[in-house]
Image: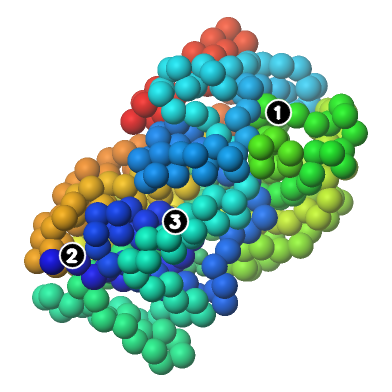
């Protein structure tokens, strides 16, 4: 008999988990606090490790239809604009890793997952359900929401992001600790490429590295839209829990300081900048950081990371597939052992990605001699430094 699993949080991780579980025949009910399912207006890069999993979930064709397939990754100095390193992406990634490197609009990816979950019809999707209490017994779990509704199931997956409430159910000393507010701020903007001057349009991932900041621009939506993100080590933009705030180009430029003409022109051309305060946690240290008995965590709920490796959503998708694989066709009685196997299989990779994301931040934002050494290494090693076989092949 299939298991009945409650998934708290309907972001990319929660929906990928519901889809993966329902493909194994389980009932997965998703509880999302927002009034409607949706994602923010920003882009997300998906390495071959993530696109391969989405293909396994039956989304290969749909994903290719919504994605942009960038030609290359090009790294430049934010101050001079000079090219430091380049790595081909499109055919090269497909040939090397057997899956594409894609850039997508989050709302498009989220919509693809939502449609697939709905099409399977193997569970209910509940919105306006802000989970505030989780109770577990030997064979049941119970969720209740702030508006006094309650639901029962045989297991719970916490996919409730950075400020996860479900993670308090873990049996670890840090389960109830809040995440770290990094003090780094991300500014994001998107626009239809057709509305930009031809010189600013692009079909590649461009990264500019500056002291204590970096910027990334890449195409989404079949290459028709452009996503730009700038991350600077400036004071957090307001309350760290209040993610999505309107901001201005003036505030962004003040945080950035000096940058090259090409980057300035691109930033000036982008409308509607929004700012996010970034949070993370120290890399997880053991399997108990991801599951306990009938409770498992996926994505940012378990291992939130700074976005300097562009892999947070990728790890959430990997988690989702691994969790469903661990449970397979097992019934409710098999859940605790399956969740333990899942956590054992996933924790070390997630910890490695969290640690590398932090390290990348130090390298991207380097100043002084470290910055000089980084630029020399990038010029000499180029592609060999940018490629990540341990990550993309995993
Ligand atoms: C600037 C920036 C750039 C990034 N770029 C990339 C990238 O290029 N590639 C990549 O792979 N990753 C990237 N990431 C990381 C990625 O966005 C996250 O890792 C990913 O979205 C995590 O998905 P999730 O489903 O685990 O959590 P979330 O996306 O946070 O989803 C959690 C969901 O749970 C809901 N929720 C929360 N609490 C409750 C509750 N109590 N009850 C009910 N529902 C609740 C929320 O409303 C939300 O819908 C980036 C992040 C940032 C900030």
Mark 3: C-beta under 8 Å from nearest atom of ligand 1? no
Question: Where is residue 2 drawn, in percent x and y?
Answer: 18, 65
Q: Secondary structure at mark 3?
A: helix
Q: Which residue is mark 2?
A: 2
Furthest toward the right, the residue is: 197
Label 3 CA crowd tier, 10 Å (few <14, some 14–19, many 20+): some
Q: What quarter of the picture does the C terminus occupy?
A: top left
The circle on residue 214 is: none
Could you tell whether 104 is left or right of 8 in the image? right
N-terminal label among 2 and 3: 2
- Quarter of the rendering occupied by the N terminus: bottom left
Q: Nearer the viewer, mark 1 or mark 3?
A: 3
Separation of residues labelled 1 and 3 (CA atoms) = 28 Å
Q: 10 Å neighbourhood of mark 1: few (<14), some, or many (≥20)? A: many
> In terms of secondary structure, where does tag 1 sit?
loop
- Residue 336 coordinates in the image, percent (x, y): 14, 62
The spot of residue 140 in percent (x, y) is 18, 77
User: In terms of sequence position, does the residue under pointer 2 or pointer 1 come before the other?
Assistant: 2
Residue 24: image quadrant is bottom left
Ligand 1 lies under 8 Å from the Cβ of mark 1: no
Q: Which mark is residue 203?
A: 1
Q: Is residue 241 visible?
A: yes
Q: Which residue is mark 3?
A: 116
The residue located at (35%, 40%) in the rendering is 56
Circles 1 and 3, Cβ within 8 Å, touching? The answer is no
- Give whichever of 66, 79 is nearer the camera: 66
Report which quarter residue 207 is drawn in: top right
């Amino acid at each position: 008999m299939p298991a009945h699993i409650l998934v708290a949080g309907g972001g990319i991780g929660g929906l990928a988990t519901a889809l993966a579980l329902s493909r194994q025949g389980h009932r997965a009910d998703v509880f999302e606090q927002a009034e409607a399912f949706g994602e923010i207006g920003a882009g997300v890069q998906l390495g071959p490790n993530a696109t391969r999993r989405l293909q396994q979930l039956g989304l290969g064709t749909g994903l290719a239809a919504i994605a942009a397939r960038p030609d290359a990754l090009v790294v430049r100095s934010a101050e001079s604009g000079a090219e430091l390193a380049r790595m081909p992406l499109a055919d090269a990634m497909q040939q090397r890793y057997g899956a594409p490197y894609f850039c997508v609009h989050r709302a498009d990816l989220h919509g693809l997952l939502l449609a697939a979950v709905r099409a399977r019809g193997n569970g209910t999707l509940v919105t306006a359900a802000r989970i505030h209490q989780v109770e577990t017994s030997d064979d049941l779990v119970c969720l209740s929401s702030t508006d006094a509704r309650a639901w029962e199931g045989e297991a719970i997956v916490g996919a409730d992001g950075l400020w996860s409430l479900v993670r308090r159910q873990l049996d670890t000393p840090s389960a109830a600790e809040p995440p770290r507010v990094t003090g780094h701020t991300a500014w994001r903007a998107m626009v239809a490429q057709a509305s930009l001057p031809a010189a600013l349009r692009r079909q590649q991932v461009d990264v500019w590295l500056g002291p204590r900041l970096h910027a990334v621009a890449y195409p989404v939506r079949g290459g028709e839209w452009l996503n730009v993100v700038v991350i600077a080590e400036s004071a957090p933009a307001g309350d760290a829990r209040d993610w999505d705030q309107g901001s201005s180009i003036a505030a962004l430029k003040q945080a950035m300081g000096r940058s090259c003409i090409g980057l300035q022109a691109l930033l000036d051309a982008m409308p509607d900048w929004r700012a996010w305060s970034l949070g993370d946690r120290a890399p997880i240290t053991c399997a108990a950081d991801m599951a306990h008995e009938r409770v498992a965590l996926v994505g940012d709920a378990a291992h939130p990371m700074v976005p300097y490796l562009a892999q947070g959503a990728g790890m959430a998708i990997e988690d989702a597939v691994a969790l469903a694989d661990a449970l397979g066709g097992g019934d409710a009685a098999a859940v605790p052992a399956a969740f333990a196997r899942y956590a054992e299989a996933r924790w070390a990779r997630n910890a490695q990605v969290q640690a590398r994301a932090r390290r990348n931040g130090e390298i991207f934002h380097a100043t002084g001699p470290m910055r000089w050494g980084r630029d020399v290494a990038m010029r000499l090693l180029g592609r060999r430094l940018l490629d990540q076989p341990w990550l993309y092949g995993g």
